[in-house]
Amino acid sequence: MRRGLVFGKFMPLHRGHQHLIDTALADCDDLTIVVYDSDPLDGSRQLMPIALRLAWLRRLYPEVENILGVDDPEKYNPERDGPEYAAVYAEQLAFLGRFDRVFSSEPAYEHFAELMKARHVLVDGARATVPTSGTIIRADLYGHRGWIEPVVYSSLIKKVALVGTESTGKSTLARACAAAFDTLWVHEFGRELWEAQDLRGTFADHLKMARRQYQREQAALRHARDFLFCDTTAWTTMHWSLRSYGTADARLVALVDSTMDEYLWILCDNDFGWVQDGTREMIDGEAARFQEQQRDDLERRGVGYRILSGPLEERVEQMRTLLSPSHPSGS
């Protein structure tokens, strides 16, 4: 049985890495992929934690049984790719046993392969087949997204959920933020369905709305830049179901529970000025009670959220601050 080794940071996993892995899979009976928990100087480790990088590989290569993460013993050393450090890395991976092949796209790793007592297989060393690199892609993820699998690129976009009671400016803010950040926003499918059905709906419609809304988000992620602004979520739809029927479909609740962590949650303050646009339902203080219900649920779930208040221009500026790289939630 021929054993092969592929290793790297995979920040992010791109077509060049996949060409390397595919070549190794075609040549070996058993392949091990090692992911180093490195700390590049451009700060990408914060954006691409090792758990995420492992998840990419495990999803795209389910046939590879041994995909593991290890700490980079020279993570803070910018010269760590030099052959003089090969022994450090070879010793660290000795516990994996003997390999017959070590695959890489760098001639400098020949010495590392020798120390592993394996043959070094150089794959696309001239970058002729896949002319890119992680450094190039990290400098402009959006511009180079064609070199990345959609599942990888989508996971690097931060979804911003805009929630709140009726007439709190969610759609207006989503549209304005998409323009301000040169990205996309996801329209509210529930409103479209509600209007198409002459302002009538059923209990079953809520699951349909939530699923379609989530599908729209997943499609939009592939073409968004840094952020995707979501005008409602499955969680909001669940609260409307609770308001109208006192309960929600178990499948809708499951969708909510499984996706809460995907968003940065923004609660739009109920100070925007109530506007009857022909579809509003809440009267006599119900809007305020619905707002309180949503806030209580976020707190009960332990979900961190921010409240944006004031006129539209102020809310957009608050969002800029919140999503700036120096802000904890924006990094």
Image (tube, grey):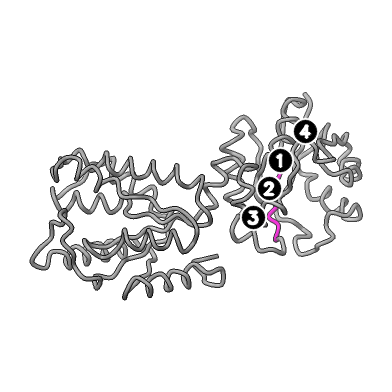
Q: Quadrant of residue 298?
A: bottom left
Name the secondary structure under disc 4.
strand
How far from the left and from the top, in percent, is residue 109?
A: 87, 45
Task: Indicate whether residue 283 is drawn in magenta.
Answer: no
In the image, taking residue 17 as reference, residue 257 lies left or right, namely left
How far from the left and from the top, in percent, is residue 60?
A: 59, 36
The Cα atoms of the two marked residues, 1 and 3, are separated by 18 Å
Of the two numbered discs 1 and 3 on the same chain, state the one appearing first in sequence: 1
Name the secondary structure under disc 1.
helix
The residue carrying mark 3 is 140
Q: Amino acid at mark 3?
A: Asp
Of the two numbered discs 3 and 2 on the same chain, state the one appearing first in sequence: 2
The residue carrying mark 2 is 10
Q: Amino acid at mark 4?
A: Gly
| Mark 4 neighbour class, 10 Å CA radius: few under 14, some 14 to 19, many 20 or more | many
Of the two numbered discs 3 and 4 on the same chain, state the one appearing first in sequence: 4
The residue carrying mark 4 is 4
The Cα atoms of the two marked residues, 4 and 2, are separated by 18 Å
Name the secondary structure under disc 3.
loop
